[in-house]
Image (spheres, helix red, strand yellow):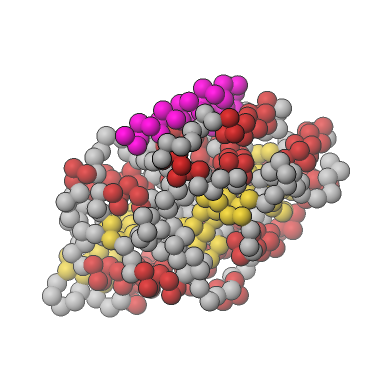
Amino acid sequence: MRHTLPSARSTRLLAACLAAGISLAGCSAATSSSSKSSGSGSASLSYLTFETPSLTASFWDTSIASGEKAVPGVTIKKLVSPSTDRDAYAKQLQASGQFPDLLQSITPSTFVQAGLLKPYDQSWVNANFLLPMGNAYKGKVYIPPTNSQIIPMVFYNKTMFAKAGIASAPKTWADFMADCAKLKAAGMTPIELGGGDPFAASMPLTGILSADVLGKDPNWLQERYAGKVKFTDANVETAVAKYRTMAKNGYFEDGALGVKYADSITNFTSGKAAMYMMGSWFLGSVPKDHADDFGSFMTPTDDGSLVVPFSVGGSMAISAKTPAPDKATAFAEAWSTDPANLKTLIEGDGAFPMLKGKTLADYNVTVTQVFKDSYAYVTDKNTKVSSIGWATNDDSMPSGLNDAYYAASQALFTSDDVAGQMAKLDSAWNAATK
């Protein structure tokens, strides 16, 4: 779930900004003050979670109780992040000597660099997951790859398409733009954009960059770390200009930068816009009473080639400082492979399950046809690339870069200065990787 659990990203707003000014390295030797282990084999472990409309307090309490039952002697103290930025909150806890024993859906890279996380046994990972190295960092797995997301997909209202004379989903970028023009001419808002929340404002740009830049060069992010490519390169600016054109042509709703993420979901599902570029977690919000009205497709490319912006999510990280590593690992493994937990994530958060040897039917889930069609992009052989800004593996952006990326997305909604915004991203990247 790194969420990839989103729901309001769960919003994964997640990958986002880490709290400024708090040094991890300076406190990396701190141990958790809330974990206790006795010689009798019992352990009290702190577990950082988060709550969303889909992943409620009841879900966490039930899943924790199940994990405690599977691992005798373990007692879990649940901590709930007060914000969507779990990374920042974990850093705050760490700075005060209270780094949790277990942490749900964080970004591993920053914490690994400070020596704060314990990797999972690779043989266990290989035995249980479809893509064992899907979210590995520097060759090791710090969060089990339990589920995945496509970020973004383009969801569309079939009824509105038909009213505008559009027979099927577009295959090429030219088709996509022509469909937007038809919808606008028919008096409909082509695309919903929850631009009031920075992560949601970035969705169209993420789709375009993942398709046009990473689709042609899957190693682009690694090359950016090596200084071989830049955001100001011509091919990147050409891709970004597509997003600017969408805004200039009025393909988003009026006042899109003032629309909150939650409202954007309601707007789209109630028929106020024909399309919605959002992470696949939106599938958990598809109205059951008219689910057949909705379909999905990938951000189109110029030549019609299919590129899937993919993010492998996972469950919990284990503190390298926990006084009870065996118990913490046993609980984390039990929780991560519990089909009941995946059932909630599938139905409520639109997560695509990644446990080995199971089909959707094995989770006893009720899902829509658009979920099944969307899940096919995960199971089919196709070009999968890291969703830029959402990867938790070696393609994850430097700490703090997501903030700069989101800011650029919002700025480009009203500004023609593509080159200037990309230069700012390069500067932010260089500063973050010094």
Which residue sits furthest right? 165
Nearer to the camera, 153 or 132? 132
234 sits to left or right of 434: right
Task: Please determine whether, in this image, residue 352 is positioned above or below residue 166.
Answer: below
Q: Position of residue 398 (x, y in %)?
A: 39, 41
Q: Position of residue 32 (x, y in %)?
A: 20, 56
User: At x 44% / y 57%, what residue is drawn?
Assistant: 135
Q: Which residues are magenta?
A: 407-434
Task: Please determine whether, in this image, residue 156 is positioned above or below residue 196.
Answer: below
Displayed quadrant of residue 277: top right
Q: Position of residue 199 (x, y in %)?
A: 51, 40
37 sits to left or right of 134: left
Instruction: For the C terminus, give its image quadrant.
Output: top left
Inspect this view and state whether residue 215 appears: yes
Displayed quadrant of residue 335: bottom left
Task: Please determine whether, in this image, residue 404 is positioned above or below residue 203.
Answer: above
User: At x 24% / y 59%, what residue is drawn?
Assistant: 320
Displayed quadrant of residue 149: bottom right
User: At x 22% / y 44%, what residue is drawn?
Assistant: 25
Q: Position of residue 194 (x, y in %)?
A: 58, 38
222 sits to left or right of 415: left
